[in-house]
Amino acid sequence: MSAPQAEPPEKTNAERAYRRIRDDIVAGALSPSEKMKIEMLRGRYGFGAAPLREALARLSGDHLVELQGQRGFIVAPISAKDAEEIGDLRKLLEVEALRQSIPAGDVAWEERLITTYHRLERLERDRTPSEADLYQWEIRNTEFHDATVAACTSGWLLRMRQHMYRQHERYRRFSRKSTARKRDIHDEHRALFDAAIERDVDEAIRIISSHVQRTTDTVIAGM
């Protein structure tokens, strides 16, 4: 049997460029409406023009950058209206995914839910998180929320839910520092975990609806 062929370096670099630029957009290191000239990106990230263009095309599909005709790419703008619409759509998709996931969850689902919750809980005990903690918190938060809906049987629903979750993530990061000390998110996550592990679908839906709405409200207030 022949050995598997290595992935072309330009493809690997395009993936790396995509992830690094995306992380900087979501974190706010690249500002909304900022111009994204290839030369600037080459100097910032060290990739060639071809992988950067491929990364920008993917980010355009994610609605994180915009192509402005012949003027090139810019970081997608943000607005309170978009934050509200994205929050509403995320809430709808999260609710339906939970509705399907909780009754279908098996032992592996429970184990994943317990593991991701306890990893998140350890971070949330710190009431004065550093910048590095906030980055890790976003990872753990995503893992936990993904775990709650992991048993959902609709692949399309999960893909749409993930897309809106990522859009919501960008807005959350603009307000997290100012709201982390005003809201006990840990209590909200603990309540969601308890409802999910007890297979209380109605309570889990009530909690996630309130949780997402409160996040959206604090994002809009922070803007």
Image (cartoon, rainbow, N blue to C red):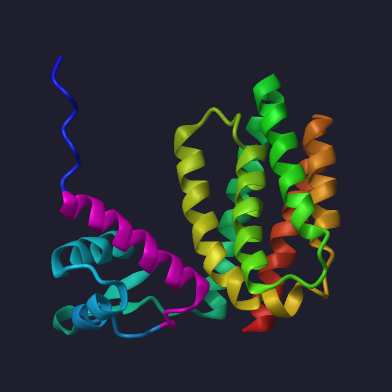
Image coordinates of residue 209 in percent, x first then y, are 73, 53
Which quarter shows the N terminus?
A: top left
Residue 139 figure quarter: bottom right
* Residue 46 x, y percent position in the rendering: 25, 71
Q: Say above or below: 13 vs 119.
A: below
Q: Residue at x 50, y 40 (%)?
A: 157
Residue 24 percent across, percent down from the top left:
44, 71
| Apparent side of residue 63 relative to residue 29 in the rendered image (left or right) | left
Which residues lie in the magenta part? 9-32
Judged by its main secondary structure, the magenta piece is helix
Q: Residue at x 13, y 20 (%)?
A: 2
220 or 150: nearer the viewer = 150
Quick check: 154 left or right of 43?
right
- Point 65% across, 46% down: residue: 145
Q: Is residue 61 visible?
A: no
Query: Magenta segment: does it hold 26?
Result: yes
Q: How many numbered circles are shown?
A: 0
Determine the residue located farthest toward the top in the rendered image. Answer: 1
Q: Is residue 73 left or right of residue 179?
A: left
Residue 84 horizontal/vertical position (percent): 59, 70
Q: Please tell me in which quadrant of the rendered image residue 60 appears.
A: bottom left
Q: Is residue 34 left or right of residue 38?
A: right
Task: Using the rendered image of the protein, determine whether residue 201 is visible from the camera's viewpoint.
Answer: yes
With respect to residue 152, does 75 lie above or below?
below
200 is within the stretch colored magenta:
no
Q: Nearer the viewer, residue 64 or 115?
A: 115
Foreground residue among 162 and 118: 118
| Quadrant where the image shows the C terminus | bottom right
